């Protein structure tokens, strides 16, 4: 938890950044959307779980964009995401719901930069703290956080595609697609198994030029 507090403090401090000729911060973004997540899983024999499927959840983030010239943007963000997966065991439905709060940094390059629209592919890395983990098997519910079954920190990386549409001189509509993949195991006692988060995010929000 101390790492999360430190990360959020550094994120907040970045609002005060200034360049020599003026403000370095170019934009502030507020987004909300949906996650479609599952697990990258293999058992001790290297076999996948063929019953694994995606589950949907909510995601919200606040980010600031730092200008690196006319074409490049470096963003820092704080984000809440609902991840997990679905499967089945002996004909009983199995559902995992994992809620994370974390910080991240992304790099974007504007391949289209018109007065009314921009399109920017990029890459992102995040560091998320597990707020709550829950597993449901049939009608039985298990608190994975209290059972200490999962690691509390999840390092992840991914690719994104962002587009902004001008509404006024300072207000833009923001659309973004992301694909993220976990870089570390999420289970503490893996017993030879490999389990990582993965998923897609679709975001819609408002972006303000400063």
Image: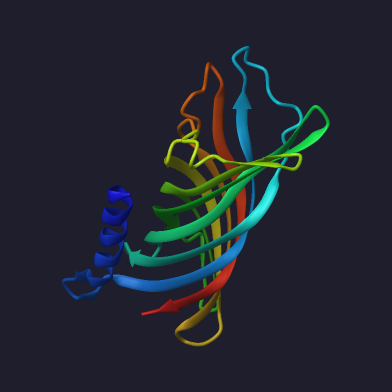
Query: Residue 66: x, y in percent?
Result: 33, 65
- Quadrant including the C terminus: bottom left
Q: In the image shown, does 38 or 73 lie closer to the viewer?
A: 38
Q: Which residue is pictured at 32% across the width and 59% down the height?
A: 8
Q: Residue at x 39, y 73 (%)?
A: 27
Asked whether the viewer can see residue 128, the reply is yes
Residue 108's place in the image compared with 184, above or below, is below
Q: Position of residue 51 (x, y in %)?
A: 76, 31
176 horizontally vs 131: left or right? right
Q: x and y percent of residue 72 in the render?
A: 38, 60
Q: Residue most toward the top?
A: 45
18 is higher (above) or lower (below) than 188: below
- Tell whether 75 sits left or right of 198: left
Residue at the extreme left: 20
- Left/right of residue 10 with respect to residue 43 in the rendered view: left
Q: How is the image coloured?
A: rainbow
Q: Quadrant of residue 42?
A: top right
Towards the viewer: 57 or 198: 57
Residue visible at 44% across and 57% down? 109
Residue at (33% x, 49% y) in the render: 1
Q: Is residue 74 left or right of residue 141?
A: left
Residue 174 makes an appearance in the image: no
């Amino acid at each position: 938890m101390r790492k999360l507090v430190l990360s959020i403090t550094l994120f907040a401090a970045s609002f005060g950044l200034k360049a020599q000729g003026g403000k370095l911060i170019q934009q502030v973004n507020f987004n909300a959307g949906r996650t479609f997540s599952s697990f990258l899983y293999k058992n001790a024999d290297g076999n996948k779980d063929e019953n694994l499927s995606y589950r949907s959840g909510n995601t919200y983030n606040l980010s600031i964009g730092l200008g690196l010239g006319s074409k490049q943007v470096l963003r820092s963000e704080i984000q809440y995401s609902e991840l997990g997966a679905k499967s089945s065991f002996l004909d009983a439905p199995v559902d995992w719901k994992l809620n994370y709060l974390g910080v991240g940094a992304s790099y974007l390059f504007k391949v289209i930069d018109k007065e009314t629209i921009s399109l920017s592919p990029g890459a992102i890395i995040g560091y998320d703290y597990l707020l709550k983990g829950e597993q449901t098997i049939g009608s039985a519910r298990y608190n994975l956080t209290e059972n200490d079954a999962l690691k509390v920190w999840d390092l992840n990386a991914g690719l994104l595609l962002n587009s902004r549409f001008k509404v006024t001189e300072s207000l833009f509509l923001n659309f973004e697609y992301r694909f993220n993949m976990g870089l570390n195991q999420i289970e503490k006692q893996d017993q030879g198994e490999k389990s990582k988060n993965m998923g897609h995010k679709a975001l819609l929000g408002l972006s303000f030029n400063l």
